[in-house]
Amino acid sequence: MKAKTLDVEKVEKVAFILKALGNPLRISIIDLLRIHQELSVNQLSEKLGAEQSLVSHNLSNMKLKGILSSRREGKNIYYHLKLKEVLKVLECMQHCEL
């Protein structure tokens, strides 16, 4: 039986996502957005117990890469997932036995 090769397009997309999320804080941010759909920078900082500037930096980075989108409401910026395939990668990670 011949082994099936990986789809090149899928490999490239997964590699992009893994590189963009290659940080425990970013993975935690995505997981919180998976649960809550949308959160402000302050809410994320609180839930993660991390400095707002650090959370903000990581959010900006993921937004630039097209993983997240944001909207402004007064002084608050709310973030939500834009690239839904990120959730599939997290789901695979949860089922992986390391």
Image (cartoon, rainbow, N blue to C red):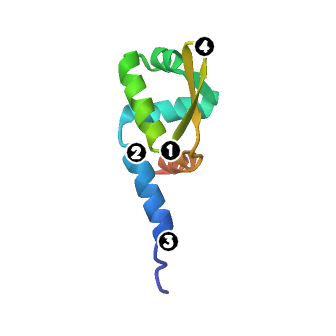
Query: Which secondary structure lies at badge 3?
Result: loop
Q: Nearer the viewer, mark 1 or mark 2?
A: 1
Q: Nearer the viewer, residue 9 or 74?
A: 74
Left or right placement of residue 34 versus residue 8 in this view: right
What residue does disc 4 label? 74
Is residue 70 visible in the rendered image? The answer is yes
Q: Nearer the viewer, mark 4 or mark 3?
A: 4
Q: Earlier in the sequence, mark 4 or mark 1?
A: 1
**Residue 9 in the image: x percent, y percent?**
49, 67
Q: Count neighbours of disc 3 (C-alpha within 10 A) and say few if under 14, some if 14 to 19, many if 20 or more.
A: few
**Residue 44 in the image: x percent, y percent?**
50, 21
Q: Earlier in the sequence, mark 2 or mark 4?
A: 2
What residue does disc 1 label? 66
Q: CA distance from mark 4 to mark 3?
A: 44 Å
Q: Check disc 1 and give the amino acid type.
A: Gly
Q: Count neighbours of disc 2 (C-alpha within 10 A) and say few if under 14, some if 14 to 19, many if 20 or more.
A: some
Q: Check disc 4 and give the amino acid type.
A: Gly
In the rendered structure, are the residues bearing label 1 and label 2 in contact, judged by CB atoms less than 8 Å apart? no
Q: Nearer the viewer, mark 3 or mark 2?
A: 2
Q: Check disc 2 and give the amino acid type.
A: Ala
Q: Quadrant of residue 35?
A: top right
Q: Nearer the viewer, mark 2 or mark 4?
A: 4
What residue does disc 2 label? 20
